[in-house]
Image (tube, rainbow, N blue to C red):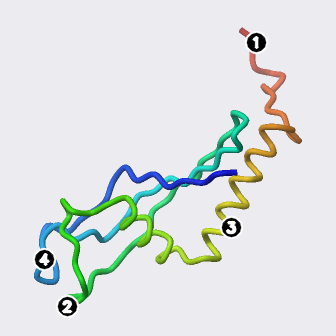
Amino acid sequence: MTYDWFFSVLDVRPSAEGQTDVVYQIQWRYGGDDGDGHSAFVSGRVGCTYTEGDPFIPFADLTKSDVEGWTTTNLGDDEVARLKVQIDGMIAEEITPTTEAMTPPWQEQS
């Protein structure tokens, strides 16, 4: 199983703590792929805080690795592990379903 982070939006404060475009919230998707055509994703948001005097990376210089590090640090190891378990479960359910979605019998079939 391989896992990867995807970041579509970084929420910023135009001016904060003496800097410009300071990231304060990360919108993320975390996905897993089993290599056999099965994949699953979970998504969420996590806050991050910049404190004046800490090292600062200008927004234009941010890398995926920078944001991934902030995300995993702010979520914590236990939460990242829980997300992996959730993704693994979703893929296992896709491979071998234990449930089925059914239309209620009173609704017309088309």
Question: Which of label 1 and label 3 is nearer to you?
Answer: 3
First of labels 4, 3 by sequence position: 4
The amino acid type found where label 1 is placed reads Gln
The amino acid type found where label 3 is placed reads Arg
Q: Are marks 2 and 4 in contact (CB under 8 Å)?
A: no
The residue indicated by pointer 1 is 109
Q: Residues within 10 Å of mark 4 (few under 14, many from 20)?
A: some
Distance in Å between CA atoms under marks 2 and 3: 33 Å
First of labels 1, 3 by sequence position: 3
Distance in Å between CA atoms under marks 1 and 3: 39 Å
The residue indicated by pointer 4 is 19
The amino acid type found where label 2 is placed reads Gly
What is the secondary structure assignment of the residue under circle 1?
A: loop
First of labels 2, 1 by sequence position: 2
Q: Residues within 10 Å of mark 3 (few under 14, many from 20)?
A: few
First of labels 2, 4 by sequence position: 4
Residue 94 picture quarter: top right
Q: Residues within 10 Å of mark 2 (few under 14, many from 20)?
A: few
The residue indicated by pointer 3 is 82
The residue indicated by pointer 2 is 53
Compared across the picture, whether 49 is left or right of 73 comes to: left
In this rendering, the answer to whether 102 lies above or below 34 is above
What is the secondary structure assignment of the residue under circle 2?
A: loop
Residue at figure coordinates x 37%, y 58% from the top left: 64
